[in-house]
Amino acid sequence: MNKQDIFQTVDSLQSVFEDCVSTLFTHPETGGHEKFSANYLRQILSSAGFTIHDQAKMEHTFYAEYGQGKPVIAILGEYDALPGLSQKPISHQEPVQVGGAGHGCGHNLLGSAALVAALAIQQWLAKENMSGTIRFYGCPEEELLSGKVKMLRLGMFEGCDLALSWHPMDINCAYEESYLANISVRFVFRGKTAHAAVAPWQGRSALDAVELMNVGVNYLREHVIDAARIHYSTQCDNIPNIVPDLASSWYFIRAPHMSDVLSILDRVEKVAKGAAMMTETTVDIDVEYGCWEMKKAKIMTDICYENLKEAPFPPFTQEELDFAKAIQMSVDPQIVENKNHLYGTSQRIMNSCVEDRSFWKTVFMTASTDTGDVSFNMPMSTFSSACWPVGIGPHTWQAAACAGSSLGAKGAFYAAHVLAGQAFDFLQEPEYVQAAQKEFNENKSIQYKSILNHFDS
Ligand SMILES: [Zn+2]
């Protein structure tokens, strides 16, 4: 079998793929609740002959394995949706269910492409009777940045030699490094209630503490590295005539490296304690979860890039391009123009070319993902595929609309070919696996420690 044969095997799975895209799209489940999606994928994989491993004992996560011996290749699948982004696959904003969840990050596409790539590789392994194992990872809670961190802690990735991942976006690009490390932390202040007019001096306001903390952190911004991101959301449910005894601020702290995040967290904690001291309240600091940046993986990215170029890109129909144009016109034209400028194009609707090998530096992703933690445990590649028009960002109704359309499905089907192509290369050429692992082992200047373990000790 050669690379074209494996691409044709992916093609033969088109109806499985399309069913999966639309089934996950029409059953959007937010992080922590992906029971239907996980069971749906389990069922397909199990009837195809994969063995299901459920050691997490959580309905929404599993991995499915087929084959024997080395190498063991993991393909990462996600399927969680986002709250409030319910959207029909049409070119204006209209939810399927008002306030409901929707696939605004295209994880229905992500999971479906990963599934089909794993199925194609399985068919090949079955035919050739060769050494090699393919695993599909059912990874939940990506939007909470916690699923893979928990799975790693449970040992679900033990035995894997390398991992393949991807994400829907508006360009086709291989990323050698990417993503910001991130920590999610809640600061809960407690004070004393009092009547806000009759005896305010008897009260100690937890809300005052939250406000002072937020002001302090906003001053701190000037004195942290430029690439850091700090954002928060504040909660206090009291009515104004009661001095509030409970208020909290939920922070995300992001930076290029986990070490930067931890040192900024240390300073944010000092600000929180100062705010508590000023207001005579107490503060509880609860680090909920955190994920690492993506570890540099040059050899993995080389192979990924070659497959981006080799895989067939499905041509878009005029109807799909008209849909893409209408979606693109729903955002500020300046955003589209800036994006086109960044991509070195003009007035492009859909990206159908593969960006240069080093383009990831220009479009470095400043989001965070729990995929980063996987990249510190084994060699991992990642790439993006154009599933929505130039200028559209993830976590929008426009991205959700595309994720339910044939436009998004075509971009994801291309991604399935790229994933299968990479897995094929690693199974066919064991020396690629050894080279990727050698690079991974030589680059151990940063010691990985799960954030879940970090705060236990
Ligand atoms: Zn996503």
Image (cartoon, rainbow, N blue to C red):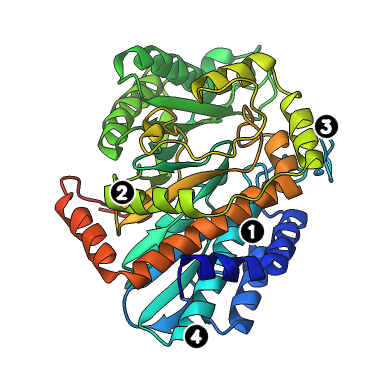
Give residue 280's position: percent from left, percent from top: 41, 22
Q: Which residue is mark 1?
A: 33
Against 275, residue 373 (above or below) is below
**Neighbour tally class for label 1: few under 14, some 14-19, many 20 plus, Cα within 10 Å:** some
Kind of residue indicated by mark 4: Lys
User: In front: 396, or 177?
Assistant: 177
**Neighbour tally class for label 3: few under 14, some 14-19, many 20 plus, Cα within 10 Å:** some
**Callouts 4 and 2 close, C-beta under 8 Å:** no
Question: Distance of mark 2 from mark 3, alpha carbons?
Answer: 45 Å
Say which mark, if any, is on residue 92: 3
Residue shown at 43%/38% (left/top)?
A: 185
Kind of residue indicated by mark 2: Phe
Kind of residue indicated by mark 3: His
Q: Secondary structure at mark 2?
A: loop
Q: Which residue is mark 4?
A: 127
Residue 179: quadrant of the picture: top left
Give residue 343's position: percent from left, percent from top: 51, 26
Q: Earlier in the sequence, mark 4 or mark 3?
A: 3
Pick out the residue farthest to the bottom: 129
Left or right: 60 with respect to 263?
right
Left or right: 166 with respect to 330?
left
Q: Is mark 1 within 8 Å of ligand 1?
A: no
Q: Which residue is mark 2?
A: 455
Q: Earlier in the sequence, mark 4 or mark 1?
A: 1
Which of pointers 4 and 1 indicates the residue nearer the eye? Answer: 4
Q: Classify the position of ligand 1 by quadrant: top left, top right, bottom left or bottom right.
A: top right
Q: Earlier in the sequence, mark 1 or mark 3?
A: 1
Give residue 33's position: percent from left, percent from top: 64, 58
Left or right: 195 with respect to 178?
right
Give residue 45's position: percent from left, percent from top: 59, 76
Question: Distance of mark 4 from mark 2, alpha carbons?
Answer: 47 Å
Kind of residue indicated by mark 1: His
